[in-house]
């Protein structure tokens, strides 16, 4: 088995070149070919000498893996299924909007967090994705050139795979990599505090926190992570950081009809978020068979939005996209697809 170059940092590529006794500047050339130009094979790296390409090919391969399947939605959203290795199936979603094209990437196959309403959580944990596999979602995208934003909101909990996620962000944002602004990247977490703090200090990307309920007992019922890292403590940590300026923290909130959309919930949310420059992003619940609870309809969403705004909170209602192809972030589950293969 040859090792993939995709997913290696410039420093790691320099290590590869040193090991193979290739000139140091070759590393930068390789990074250029795999990240900026997106070549699929070492032979195409035309500014490397024939000898260098031969030596490199003996142990390495680019490692670009195209999607196995793509499904288009009526509204322009695309869902891509990837097969990584023997039996790992993972998905991404591309969401074109007026001005931007957002890719929603996965960080794990399955997830350990076990949120009751989540199709990925329902599968249990399969394995962590490598930085190379995360980067492959971006680089193998047929419409790569159109991409403007990346959200880590697909399958898995990014902060439960911290090292690889941070490495993928380094590749996306470095000059030698994709040279993307960190302000075009958002990482969503269910609230793993230690890694969340590291992320705040080690990157300049936006952060999204999945709240879904401000009350300890109620949140504990749907999100087991509440036991170890209560949402109140998550908010306390976030409050210590200055979020003014260009960098954003937002709170994700699925509105379950009659469960988390009362006056008391709105009041408690405003208490938890006091002093934090933030926005509450209201999400429609995409029902999963395992969690048989009704989501709020448009009118109920707007009513809850007004309730929150009366407490002085800034809110948005997230547009639902790609519902006909089960492509909403958080609805990614390859269970069915893998059964079909
Ligand atoms: N694990 C991270 C990121 C992936 S989930 C997290 O939990 O934040 C991305 C978002 O989709 C989260 O806000 C999650 O709560 C939400 N989500 C999960 N299942 C959903 C569903 N059935 N309907 C709507 N949103 C859902
Ligand atoms: Fe994991 Fe996020 Fe789903 Fe919870 S909502 S199970 S943390 S992917």
Image (spheres, rainbow, N blue to C red):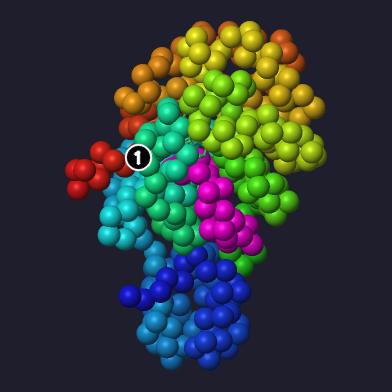
For the point 25% across and 42% down, the residue is: 337
For the point 49% across and 84% down, the residue is: 48
Magenta residue check for 286: no
Residue 57, placed above or below residue 198: below
Magenta residue check for 152: yes
Q: Is residue 319 left or right of residue 304?
A: left
Q: How many marks?
A: 1
Residue assigned mark 1: 123
> Which residue range is magenta in the image?
149-174
Which quarter of the figure is the N terminus placed in?
Answer: bottom left
Q: How far across and how far down the image is residue 60, in percent?
A: 41, 78
Q: Is residue 183 left or right of residue 86?
A: right
Q: Is residue 235 left or right of residue 77?
A: right
For the point 54% across and 15% down, the residue is: 260
Quarter of the image holding residue 24? bottom right
Front in this rendered view, residue 271 or 251: 271
Q: Is residue 189 left or right of residue 273?
A: left
């Amino acid at each position: 088995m040859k090792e993939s170059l995709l997913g290696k940092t410039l420093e790691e590529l320099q290590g590869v070149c040193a090991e193979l006794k290739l000139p140091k500047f070759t590393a930068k050339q390789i990074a250029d070919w795999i990240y900026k130009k997106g070549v699929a094979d070492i032979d195409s790296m035309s500014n490397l000498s024939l000898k260098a390409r031969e030596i490199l090919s003996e142990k390495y391969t680019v490692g670009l893996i195209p999607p196995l399947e793509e499904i288009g939605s009526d509204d322009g959203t695309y869902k891509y299924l990837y097969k990584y290795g023997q039996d790992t199936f993972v998905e991404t979603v591309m969401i074109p909007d007026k001005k931007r094209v957002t890719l929603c990437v996965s960080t794990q196959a399955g997830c350990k967090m076990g949120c009751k309403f989540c199709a990925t959580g329902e599968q249990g944990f399969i394995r962590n994705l490598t930085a190379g596999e995360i980067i492959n979602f971006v680089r193998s995208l047929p419409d790569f050139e159109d991409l403007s934003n990346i959200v880590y909101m697909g399958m898995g909990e990014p902060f439960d795979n911290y090292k690889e996620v941070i490495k993928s962000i380094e590749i996306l944002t470095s000059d030698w990599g994709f040279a993307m602004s960190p302000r075009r990247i958002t990482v969503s977490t269910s609230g793993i505090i230690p890694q969340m703090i590291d992320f705040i200090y080690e990157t300049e990307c936006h952060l999204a926190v999945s709240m879904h309920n401000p009350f300890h007992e109620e949140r504990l019922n749907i999100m087991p992570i509440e036991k170890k890292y209560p949402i109140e403590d998550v908010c306390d940590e976030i409050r210590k950081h200055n979020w003014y300026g260009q960098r954003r923290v937002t709170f994700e909130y699925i509105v379950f009809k009659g469960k988390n959309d009362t006056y008391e919930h709105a009041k408690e949310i405003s208490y938890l978020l006091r002093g934090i420059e933030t926005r509450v992003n209201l999400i429609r619940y995409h029902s999963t068979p395992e969690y048989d609870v009704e989501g709020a309809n448009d009118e109920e969403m707007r009513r809850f939005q007004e309730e929150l705004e009366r407490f002085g909170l800034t809110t948005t209602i997230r547009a639902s996209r790609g519902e006909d192809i089960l492509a909403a972030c958080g609805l990614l589950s390859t269970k069915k697809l893998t059964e079909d293969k």
